[in-house]
């Protein structure tokens, strides 16, 4: 993944060769992880929609769980990635790679948070009877969304200072993630408590078929998320190399 | 623009951003006052007529009477029952024996007048097929 980017004076021929037509990003990496990712997604979708039963109380609406929960999990994972990337960036300000990883992870995490909020809102409307409630879980999730939008706003701004400020937000802002997760335990909420990530002594019962569907959907979201990040970073590297090569050609 | 001047403008912007974040935090903290405790329990309300609140509890089995656009039921938590009269039709999966949050005002007549009834659900999930065949409803 981390080939050092060539900084030395390139020859015009070298620069020209790097201006070759952009490879299609989805064909650049090997097909195996793509097929594995697709297989996991299709498999988990079939199990979630067909094999897992509808809930005894909530009916078919409960299937939104297989979208809502893994999206929230992916968001947590991405924001942990932003935290790690931000720490690296603060320790080695000269390297541009942590900032790029952080940005890619934050973009994916914000999108996943959006999916979480949207699927949760539809689920809430069907089951609670309201699209939104001012309870601690919902509000803290919205705050998490805004924190990482702020991170991205700084990341998308050119300059060294906004970049370092973004890294600061990436570190301090992670504090919201445990608040989101434990809000249902710490505060009185409308939102129910966790089922899979509940304390082992208080683990509530869940139909084993639902548990399998949920576990697989979490796996599928994780696989697709990691794959998307890797593809994205490969694409960024290609684009950066092309821009450098174009600059060199213009100068020569 | 010199490096010095651009550096200073960035410092000013960061200061503004800091102040805005602080203000945002204060607004958020104020807004969260009613959020950290989403709903109170029936015992907090029984002797407080005139109070507007959100109360949570379980709908006591056999007490639910629904009529055109309204409902009457007992909401129970921790041994205290609250008689609720709702002027709206309950929403979501609201039913007997389930958790619910009611929003409204405690009346002087000892009845809680709800203008909103929200269904709650727990974190246990059971297949509709197994519950039906096992005959073990909730």
Image: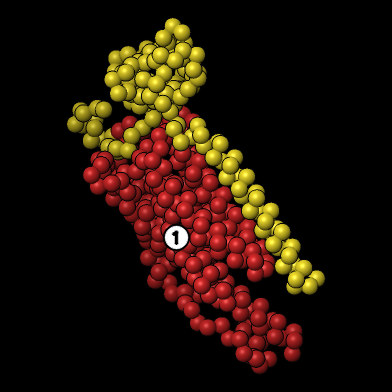
Give x and y (percent) for residue B114. Answer: 47, 17
Q: Secondary structure at mark 1?
A: helix
Question: Viewer-proximal residue, A187 or A244?
Answer: A187
Dot 1: chain letter: A
Residue B12 falls in image quadrant: bottom right
Which chain is displayed in yellow in the rendered image? B
Q: Image height check: is A9 above or below B105?
A: below
Question: Viewer-proximal residue, B45 or A129?
Answer: B45
- Could you classify mark 1 by the number of other residues whose Cα lies within 10 Å: few (under 14), some (14-19), or many (20 or more)? many
Residue beneath label 1, please? Answer: A80
At 46% from the left and 36% from the top, the residue drawn is: B36
Residue B123 falls in image quadrant: top left
- Specify the color scheme: by chain
Decide if residue A21 is in sight here.
no
Give x and y (percent) for residue A166. Answer: 58, 62
At 57% from the left and 45% from the top, the residue drawn is: B25
Q: Image height check: is B84 above or below A154?
A: above
Decide if residue B41 is in sight here.
yes
Q: Residue furthest left?
A: B134
Which chain is displayed in red in the rendered image? A
Lateral position of residue B126 relative to residue A31, left or right: left
Lateral position of residue B2 relative to residue B37, left or right: right
Give x and y (percent) for residue A117. Answer: 50, 44
At 40% from the left and 69% from the top, the residue drawn is: A33
Q: Residue furthest right?
A: B1
Q: Quadrant of the C terminus of chain A?
A: bottom right
Give x and y (percent) for residue A181. Answer: 40, 47
């Amino acid at each position: 993944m981390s080939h050092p980017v060539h900084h030395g004076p390139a020859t015009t021929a070298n620069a020209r060769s790097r201006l070759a037509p952009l490879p299609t990003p989805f064909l650049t990496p090997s097909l195996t992880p793509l097929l594995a990712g697709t297989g996991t997604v299709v498999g988990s979708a079939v199990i979630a929609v067909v094999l897992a039963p509808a809930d005894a109380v909530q009916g078919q609406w409960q299937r939104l769980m297989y979208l809502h929960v893994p999206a929230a999990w992916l968001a947590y994972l991405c924001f942990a990635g932003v935290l790690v990337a931000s720490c690296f960036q603060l320790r080695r300000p000269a390297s541009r790679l942590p900032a790029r990883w952080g940005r890619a992870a934050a973009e994916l995490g914000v999108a996943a948070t959006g999916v979480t909020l949207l699927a949760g809102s539809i689920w809430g409307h069907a089951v609670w009877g309201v699209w939104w409630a001012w309870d601690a879980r919902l509000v803290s999730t919205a705050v998490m969304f805004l924190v990482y939008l702020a991170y991205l706003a700084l990341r998308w701004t050119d300059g060294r200072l906004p970049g370092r400020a973004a890294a600061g937000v990436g570190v301090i802002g992670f504090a919201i993630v445990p608040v989101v997760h434990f809000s249902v335990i710490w505060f009185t909420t409308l939102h129910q408590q966790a089922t899979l990530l509940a304390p082992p002594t208080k683990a509530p019962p869940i139909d084993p078929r639902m548990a399998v569907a949920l576990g697989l959907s979490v796996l599928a979201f994780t696989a697709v998320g990691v794959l998307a990040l890797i593809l994205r970073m490969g694409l960024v590297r290609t684009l950066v190399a092309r821009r450098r090569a174009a600059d060199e050609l213009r100068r020569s | 623009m010199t490096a010095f001047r651009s550096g200073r403008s960035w410092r000013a912007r960061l200061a503004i951003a800091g102040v805005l974040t602080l203000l945002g935090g204060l607004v958020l903290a104020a807004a969260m006052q009613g959020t950290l405790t989403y709903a109170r329990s029936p015992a907090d309300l029984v002797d407080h007529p005139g109070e507007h609140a959100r109360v949570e509890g379980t709908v006591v089995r056999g007490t639910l009477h629904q009529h055109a656009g309204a409902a009457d039921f007992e909401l129970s938590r921790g041994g205290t029952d609250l008689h609720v009269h709702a002027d709206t039709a309950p929403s979501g999966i609201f039913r007997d024996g389930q958790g619910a949050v009611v929003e409204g005002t405690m009346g002087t007549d000892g009845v809680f007048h709800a203008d909103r009834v929200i269904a709650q659900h727990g974190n246990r999930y059971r297949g509709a097929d197994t519950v039906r065949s096992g005959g073990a409803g909730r």
